[in-house]
Image (spheres, rainbow, N blue to C red):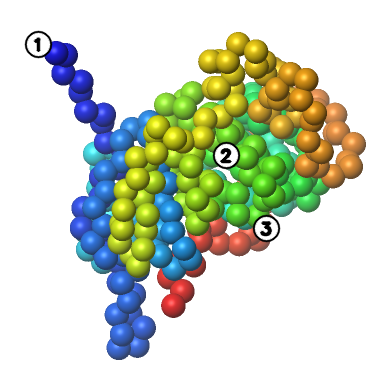
Amino acid sequence: MADVVAAPKSAIVIKGLTKIFTLGKEKVYALNGIDLNIAENEIICLLGTSGSGKSTLLNMMAGLEKPTKGSITVFGERVDKMSERKLAIFRQKYMGFVFQSYNLLPNLSAIDNVSLPLAFAGVKRSVRTKKAKKMLKLCGLGKRMKHKPTQMSGGQQQRVGIARAFVATPKIVFADEPTGNLDTHTTIEIMEMMVKMARENKQTLVIVTHDIEIAAYADRIYHIIDGRIDAVEDNRDKQIIPLEEKAADIPDVKVSEQSEDGLGIREGAAESPPDEPKIEPVEDKDEPADPQKEEERISEILGSSKIENEIHTEDETI
């Protein structure tokens, strides 16, 4: 008798999900009866034009918006039934986010921005600093740890955003138009970085995009039209595979262990122009600090920083 292959466990299960907005006397369906099952360790893409409902669907999965009707279950928990306090704790434990507009705190250095999820989780300063440094180095920003967002290019800021999303090793990472503000070369770097990290950490990655070339990195592509799933495309036989994964199967391709973009380059290949401003690196010193003062400093900066709403809701615009 042939061995029975167990079905993969579900990370997210959605049933009959509907979101209705009321405009005067008119009801507008942003989502209209979505059924969806996303497996653990799967990379999926919600693909659709602006206004299709894809970002609203992502917000629902993350518990950032409540549905009009239907259910959203994440790792066995009904997030649509959770209180705001429980949702905050649940997101902190299980979820990471990458945003199109980076949404870094402008008064914090790269290392402090990346450390924030760990600080909120109660990780002590020495541990979170070590983890943040390691993650920034993996993202090719070993010389940019003390730089603030205004001292970095768009590609570098997004790499900080990726480091922040992955530093706590969440089970699910949501990426809402993660390359929308980037050029083609940097887009490839960012996508390969996210996919590589998700594969290595066995994480579920949910990508929202309008770009078919970004969708090509996913295992499955959900085509969203007018608040419905119009088609589901199995992309596993033709998806884009990051360079380092390809190199493992191609003997004559070698990847450098550490390049400035954190991705490696083919041996002998010409490097692309660096996506960074001409700023001298800031020396990275381990300076002793009073933990209480450090927490007070971060709290003060959080209170005074003004950043745009982190979640895109353009799908709600009529």
What residue type is disc 2 on? Met
Q: Quadrant of residue 188?
A: top right
Residue sitting nearer the eye, 231 or 261 = 231
Question: Mark 3 or 1 closer to N-term?
Answer: 1
Q: Quadrant of residue 48?
A: bottom left
Please name the residue that numbered disc 1 is placed on.
1
Question: Mark 2 or 1 closer to N-term?
Answer: 1
On the image, the x and y values in percent for residue 277 come to 84, 44
**How far is the residue under mark 2 from the one under mark 1?**
42 Å
Residue sitting nearer the eye, 211 or 146 = 211
Q: Is residue 148 left or right of residue 72?
A: right
The label shown at residue 304 is 3
On the image, the x and y values in percent for residue 2 come to 14, 13
Q: Is residue 95 left or right of residue 108?
A: left
The label shown at residue 97 is none
Residue sitting nearer the eye, 236 or 154 = 236
Please name the residue that numbered disc 2 is placed on.
191
